[in-house]
Amino acid sequence: MTADVEAGTGRDAILRAARRAFTLRPYAEVTMRGIAADAGVSASLIVKRFGTKEQLFSTVTDFGPAADLLFDAPLDELGRHMVLSLVHSRRENQADPLLRVVFGLGNQDERSVMKERFREQVTARLASRLEGDERRLRAELIVGLLLGLGAAISLHRPDSATEAADPAHLADLYAPALQALVVRA
Amino acid sequence: MTADVEAGTGRDAILRAARRAFTLRPYAEVTMRGIAADAGVSASLIVKRFGTKEQLFSTVTDFGPAADLLFDAPLDELGRHMVLSLVHSRRENQADPLLRVVFGLGNQDERSVMKERFREQVTARLASRLEGDERRLRAELIVGLLLGLGAAISLHRPDSATEAADPAHLADLYAPALQALVVRA
């Protein structure tokens, strides 16, 4: 396992275990030892790499890098870019850039921090990129479309027709809906 | 509380508490007593109304009534009907007809039953209604759009522009994407 950690896969295992822990349990019940056991590493290694439990939580709830990736295109190509980069990111990292926020939807405790950061880092940032009327409403609906695409894939695994589809074909089918909200006709 | 139960609101409180319990904890850890305490009723009342824990779980994971409601329109009006009935159902029942399935996405235990029933009662049923090519893929993407709409509303509460929008306006913005997948151009 030490070799894995040095090669960088341990980092992913820790982050995956941390996401699982923080989304399934109240914040107060999450322990570094529990996350370490789930990830197959020592608690002291997690502290060395990610700091305190609070810092680890903050890393897990940071949607900034996901937004950087998803919104990195001019407005007239943004719909297609978002679909392709979401699918690419899922295939490369075996994780959806946005979908983890839905696990916090039913919760009232510290996990509501995750929703607040999402609204600021994803929805508000997207709204500030848009032009024209109803930017906030359109940004919320675009975010919904992106979450929906991720949910459709995850929900129908391992036999998801969406997951099996060619990304360019998926963009043909799904991106027009996004683009119609990015730039109003 | 007894008067409430007789008036039917207790039924909703029990179902809400049961959904919460089954989505936040492993099946084996869920107790009727815990659900009763959360709903503010007695465990014996729950047993009287819903039967055993297994039967209550089955009631909570039944997406049949939601599908009856969402799919009750001819194909050429289905996109708009799905948006309007989802929004209406959320406003009437303070609950999303489909969204609870996302809480089971990260889980490998008994809650995977919820995903299986969803796939059968919602996605497969919708696919069987569609005509033309790629019915399964289109049904998955339509399901994604519906989950995304619910997630957009829930995620941005209590200040959701989507929730505040007029349902007919929301249908104008969001239904064309659904309809393009229902009936291919």
Image: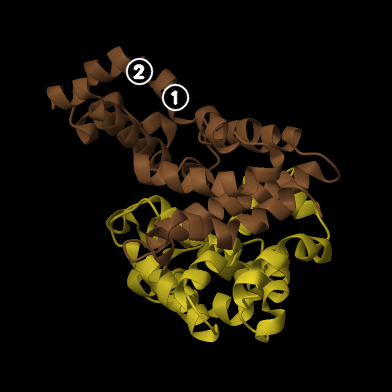
Chain colours: A brown, B yellow
Between residue B25 and residue A172, name the one nearer to us: A172
Q: Tell me residue B90's x, y (percent).
A: 67, 63
> In the image, is residue B112 above or below residue A62?
below
Q: Tell me residue A123's x, y (percent).
A: 66, 38
Instruction: Please give the label number shown on residue A50.
Output: 2
Which residue is located at x 63 percent, y 73 percent? B8
In-image side of A138 versus B120 (left or right): right
> In the image, is residue A54 above or below residue B175?
above
Which residue is located at x 47 percent, y 24 percent? A58
For the residue labelled by badge 1, is the local secondary structure a helix, a strand or a loop? helix
Q: Tell me the residue that label 1 is attached to.
A: A59
Can you tell which quarter of the image residue A122 is in? Answer: top right
Instruction: Please give the label number shown on residue A19.
Output: none
The earlier-in-sequence mark between 2 and 1 is: 2
Residue B92 visible somewhere in the drawing: no
Question: What amino acid type is highlighted by mark number 1?
Answer: Thr
> In the image, is residue A59 above or below residue B36?
above
In-image side of A112 versus B46 (left or right): right
* Discs 2 and 1 carry the same chain letter: yes
Label 2: chain? A
Q: 10 Å neighbourhood of mark 2: few (<14), some, or many (≥20)? A: some
Q: Tell me residue B82's x, y (percent).
A: 67, 72
How far separated are the C-alphas under marks 2 and 1?
A: 8 Å
Between residue A22 and residue B184, name the one nearer to us: B184
Between residue A80 and residue A129, name the one nearer to us: A80
Label 1: chain? A
Residue A3 visible somewhere in the drawing: yes
For the residue labelled by badge 2, is the local secondary structure a helix, a strand or a loop? helix
Q: Residue furthest right?
A: A133
